[in-house]
């Protein structure tokens, strides 16, 4: 999910902090899982996420999301 992805980014500061990796195995892009492609690694997944891929929606400007949690 977006929170997990943002936590993986390094902070622009003089302090060096450890990055927070997203646990799990990156799914195949050639043979993606059914439903949400991020489902296997999402800590907030729901049963619907495994069954059906969420549609994208505009959050603001150029930002989009595809998540049942925020739809």
Image: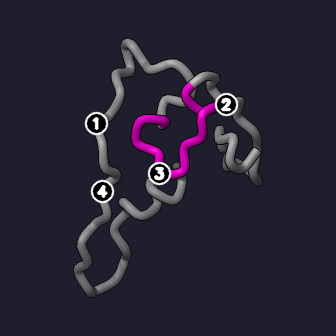
State the residue in front, 11 or 28: 28
Tag nearer the camera, 1 or 3: 3
Separation (CA) of disc 1 from disc 3: 13 Å
The answer to whether 66 appears left or right of 61 in the picture is left
User: What residue is at 65 percent from the left and 41 percent from the top?
Assistant: 67
Please give the residue where the numbered disc 1 appears in the rendered image.
25
The first of marks 4 and 2 along the sequence is 4
The first of marks 1 and 2 along the sequence is 1
Please give the residue where the numbered disc 3 appears in the rendered image.
43
Please give the residue where the numbered disc 2 appears in the rendered image.
54
User: What residue is at 64 percent from the left and 23 percent from the top?
Assistant: 52
Please give the residue where the numbered disc 4 appears in the rendered image.
21
Vertical side of 59 occupied by 31: above or below: above
Determine the image quadrant of residue 7: bottom left
Tag nearer the camera, 2 or 3: 3
Secondary structure under the numbered disc 4 in the rendered image = loop
């Amino acid at each position: 999910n977006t929170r997990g992805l943002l936590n993986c980014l390094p902070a622009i500061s003089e302090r060096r902090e450890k990055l927070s990796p997203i646990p799990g195995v990156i799914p195949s892009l050639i043979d993606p899982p059914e439903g949400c492609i991020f489902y296997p690694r999402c800590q907030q997944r729901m049963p619907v996420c495994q069954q059906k891929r969420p549609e994208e929606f505009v959050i603001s400007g150029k930002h989009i999301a595809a998540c049942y949690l925020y739809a």
